[in-house]
Image (tube, rainbow, N blue to C red):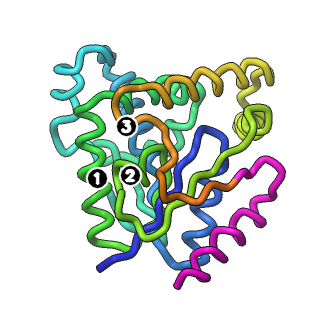
């Protein structure tokens, strides 16, 4: 039986960076659930499909739209055979991904992929409902959190590195709105699993969080 680790948390809590580093330390495949939803969001925007028209959305994604290729500890996601990883981290996609990820047929399609990967590989997966919905039987579950101001600061630095400049207040408001949407949506809301360890990363360095998680996992073995 393959092992699995679930890491959940709101935007800017450090999930992606932490999960990638922990995956390297423990020799696991890193599954960035957000990348799957971002790729579909990018596709729907490019095709001009109304997110509110679930039938059109279903028809658009009801094919071999996504191809997952295992690499050196990570999965490359191809959209109709093309690598669009450099196009799915824009602010436009970030603002649109929450409503897309709340569409039932989208979640069904992506969750089938996630569960297949967990049955074939030893993985560590991050998202918002991994420990509660996607992998409820994961061996280890963690919920990362941080203050809104800290998360906005991290997100602004990330965007500046990509040449995208927005004010701290704009990004802070985006994060607050996304937190509200993600935690109140009817389908798979952002929620800490009852058996997850919560870690507040506000005043912690990336290295400290990684050491904390790896230490807890090894201690339980």
* Residue at 73 percent of width and 18 percent of height: 170
Q: Please state the horizontal and vertical placement of residue 16, each as a whole percent of the image.
A: 59, 53
Question: Which one is in front, 116 or 9?
Answer: 9
Q: Which residue is mark 3?
A: 188
Residue 219 included in the magenta stretch of the image = yes
> Which contiguous range is marked in magenta?
200-221
How dense is the environment of label 2, judged by Cα within 10 Å: few (below 14), some, or many (20 and up)?
many
Given contact means CB atoms under 8 Å apart, are the residues at marks 2 and 1 in contact?
Answer: yes
- Count every numbered label the image shows and give the total: 3
Residue projecting furthest to the front: 194
Give the mark, 2 or 1, whose residue is nearer the N terminus.
1
Q: Which residue is mark 2?
A: 77
Question: Which one is in front, 48 or 117?
Answer: 117
Q: Marks 3 and 1, how far apart in space?
A: 24 Å
Is residue 46 toward the left or the right of residue 115 in the image?
Answer: right
* Residue at 83 percent of width and 51 percent of height: 203
Q: Nearer the viewer, mark 3 or mark 2?
A: 3
Q: Please state the horizontal and vertical placement of residue 6, each as a whole percent of the image.
A: 47, 59
Q: Please state the horizontal and vertical placement of residue 84, each as a whole percent of the image.
A: 44, 42
Given contact means CB atoms under 8 Å apart, are the residues at marks 3 and 2 in contact?
Answer: no
Look at the numbered disc 1 and give the secondary structure of its residue. Answer: strand
Q: Which residue is mark 1?
A: 67
Residue 97 included in the magenta stretch of the image = no
* Residue at 51 percent of width and 36 percent of height: 87
Residue 171, visible in the rendered structure: yes
């Amino acid at each position: 039986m393959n092992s699995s680790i679930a890491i959940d948390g709101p935007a800017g809590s450090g999930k992606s960076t932490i999960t990638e580093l922990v995956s390297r330390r423990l020799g696991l495949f890193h599954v960035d659930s957000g990348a799957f939803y971002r790729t579909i969001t990018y596709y729907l925007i490019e095709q001009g499909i109304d997110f509110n028209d679930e039938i059109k959305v279903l028809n658009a994604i009801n094919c071999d739209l996504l191809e997952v290729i295992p690499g050196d500890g990570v999965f490359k996601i191809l959209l109709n055979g093309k690598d669009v990883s450099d196009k799915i981290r824009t602010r436009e996609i970030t603002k649109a991904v929450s409503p897309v990820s709340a569409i039932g047929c989208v979640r069904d399609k992506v969750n089938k992929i996630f569960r297949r990967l967990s049955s074939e590989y030893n993985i560590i997966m991050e998202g918002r409902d991994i420990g509660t919905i996607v992998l409820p039987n994961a061996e280890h579950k963690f919920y990362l959190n941080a203050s809104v101001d800290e998360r906005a600061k991290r997100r602004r630095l990330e965007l500046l590195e990509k040449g995208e400049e927005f004010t701290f207040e704009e990004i802070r408001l985006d994060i607050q709105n996304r937190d509200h949407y993600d935690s109140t949506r009817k389908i798979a809301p952002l929620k800490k699993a009852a058996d997850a360890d919560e870690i507040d990363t506000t005043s912690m360095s990336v290295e400290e969080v990684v050491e904390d998680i790896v230490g807890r996992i090894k201690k339980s073995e």
